[in-house]
C-alpha cells in the first residue's frame, strides 16, 4: 500500500468526525457545533470524547487531553 505524505497544514484540514467514522467510531450525541464519541483512546461506557465542528479539534475529557496542533 502506498502511503501519501501530507504536510501539517493539510493535516489540520482533515475532517476529524469523518476520519473517526472511517475507523469505526460513530458519534453518540451530535449537536450543531459539536459531536460526542466514546473515546477511541480507551475503554468507556459514557461519551467523553468531544469534537468541535467549528474548530475541527478534539478533547478527551476522560483523559484531560486535547489535540496538539
Image (cartoon, grey):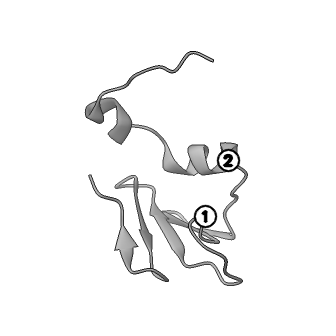
Q: Residue 15: give x, y in percent of width and height.
A: 49, 43
Q: In this view, does 23 lie above or below 36?
A: above
Q: Which residue is drawn at 69% across and 57% down?
A: 25
Q: How far apart are marks 1 and 2 (CA)?
A: 9 Å
Q: Can you name the residue that lies furthest to the top here?
A: 2
Q: Can you name the residue that lies furthest to the front here?
A: 1
State the residue in front, 18 or 65: 65
Q: Residue 46: give x, y in percent of width and height.
A: 66, 84
The residue at which mark 2 appears reads as 23
Q: How crowded is mark 2: few (under 14 residues within 10 Å), some or many (20 or more)?
A: few
The residue at which mark 1 appears reads as 40
Q: Is residue 25 above or below residue 14?
A: below
State the residue in front, 32 or 57: 57
Confirm or deny contact between disc 1 and disc 2 (CB under 8 A). Answer: yes
Q: Residues within 10 Å of mark 1 (few under 14, many from 20)?
A: some
Q: Residue at x 45, y 80 (%)?
A: 63
Amino acid at each position: 500500500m502506498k502511503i501519501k505524505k501530507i504536510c501539517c497544514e493539510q493535516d489540520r484540514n482533515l475532517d476529524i468526525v469523518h476520519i473517526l467514522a472511517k475507523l469505526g467510531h460513530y458519534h453518540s450525541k451530535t449537536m450543531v457545533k459539536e459531536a460526542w464519541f466514546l473515546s477511541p483512546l480507551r475503554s468507556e461506557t459514557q461519551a467523553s470524547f468531544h469534537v468541535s465542528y467549528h474548530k475541527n479539534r478534539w478533547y478527551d475529557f476522560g483523559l484531560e487531553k486535547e489535540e496538539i496542533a
